[in-house]
Amino acid sequence: MTTHPSPEHGIRANKSQFLLQLLQVFLVGLTIGMTRTVIPGLAETEFGLAEKQFFLLASFVVVFGLVKAVMNLLAGKLADYYGRKKVLILGWLVALPIPFMLLYAPSWNWVIAATFLLGLNQGLAWSMALNSKLDLARSTQKGLVNGLNEFSGYAAVGIAGVVTAYFVNLYGAREGLFIFSSLVILLGLLVAMFFIKDTMMWAELHHQSADPADHQTLGQLFKTASWQDRNLFALNQAGLVEKFTDALIWIFLPVFFLSQNLSLVEGSAIIMIYALVWGASQLVTGPLSDKIGRKGLIVWGMGFCGLGVLAIPLTQGSVFWSVEAAFIGLGMAMLYPNLGASVADFSSVKHQASLIGIYRFWRDLGYAIGALLMGVMAQWLDSLEVAFWLVGAAMLLSGFWVQWVVPKTVPQK
């Protein structure tokens, strides 16, 4: 009778699987990144959206945010029941129709439907890639894991924005999106099916240190995290509000740059700076929070984002906008991995996956709420700039809330 060796926690001990999981989140990042500049920039010419229809322009991100938020909430329970690998594969299977829907879309409604599937893909595949890496790593490596995960995903978002803009120039909007998205989604599915291992054994080893009497349903945990526990409440609202920034850059910044007479490729390059600085800086800010604590990085990150967003409509020229994009990216790198790691700090081992799922629910609901608010305000006032004022103010206020409520976390030994 063959016995399987006991799993060992640690990034180094599981480096091949950890790298494959990083590849998975990179591919998920490419999948969402392809929509970042091309679809908003070409909404009018390619997908039949009338000029200045700001609310309809925001609608596809509203749908994405709602779907992804719900899937984040459910993904942890699905993974505990079916295993991480099966849920990951399902995340790629639901993405398979997306390239064809964008290629043949006769109206904007098809783009919204494709975004619905994109939300399913992101909620399932990104969640599983992150949870699997947390399973594999030691409990003292949460900041590093979140930093590496978000670096991989958001570097891919930035790269995909520029690559798809070039593909559009070479092959046309629909054909360029079709070629790029087909290759990425097929590669993600094949890697998940044939190379990824399920990490449930590593997760169960973590759970051995949990208190067996500590049992709560998802509903009880949701109630606790969403309004009863003031620390988790503050972190969840910060996660929700910070998605206003990313929604702004996804929906309105490409249109703003086009209105300032930049080409699609030039605008994509500036947006790539935001995503690459965000992604790369998390290699520092994630592990740094394991040493110095998370609160200061979160609060300063919210402030950087708020000020950077407010500066964009007040300045002119690619140089200023590039610097501001980098400043916002740095702010996102400071806050993004450390909000998730802070939620893990305030969670029991047994309920960590569920509480992170609840945080990710509220965080990605911020896409929907932010896009809806920006779309309504911009449509009502017939102004792109109002979206920047709204998001900048919300980020600054949310950062003050975290500063006021959340205690400084103690670095883990």
Image (cartoon, rainbow, N blue to C red):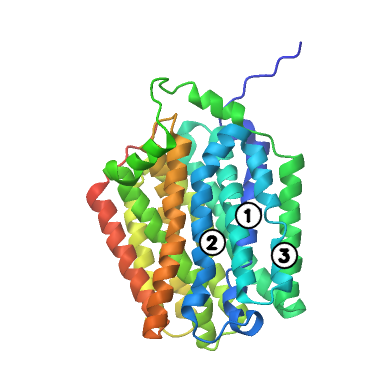
Nearer the camera: disc 1 or disc 3:
3
Amino acid type, mark 1: Val
Q: In x, y percent, where is residue 164?
A: 67, 70
Which residue in the protein does label 2 denote? 64
Q: Is residue 270 above or below residue 190?
A: below
**What residue is pinned by disc 3?**
99
Q: Is residue 325 left or right of residue 190?
A: left
* CB within 8 Å, label 1 to label 2: no
Horizontal side of residue 51 vs 31, given as left or right: left
Side of 181 where 391 appears, left or right: left
Q: Quadrant of residue 101?
A: bottom right
Residue 379 placed where, x, y %?
A: 42, 81
How packed is label 1: few (under 14 Cα within 10 Å), some, or many (20 or more)? Answer: many
Q: Are marks 3 and 2 in contact (CB under 8 Å)?
A: no
Q: Quadrant of residue 95?
A: bottom right
Q: Earlier in the sequence, mark 3 or mark 2?
A: 2
In the displayed structure, 69 sits above or below 135; it is below
Between the residue at mark 1 and the residue at mark 2, the CA separation in whole angstroms equals: 14 Å
Instruction: Say what amino acid the circle numbered 3 marks.
Output: Pro
Q: CA distance from mark 1 to mark 3?
A: 14 Å
Residue behind mark 1: 28
Q: Mark 2 belongs to which amino acid?
A: Phe
First in sequence, mark 1 or 3: give its number: 1
Label ID, residue 153: none
Q: Give percent across and percent down for residue 237.
A: 34, 54
- Between marks 1 and 2 in the image, the one whose residue lies nearer the viewer: 2
Residue located farthest toward the bottom when viewing the structure as drawn: 261
Nearer to the camera, 137 or 178: 178
| Closer to the camera in the image, 124 or 112 | 112
Comparing 193 with 308, the one in front is 193
Question: Element type at marker 1?
Answer: helix
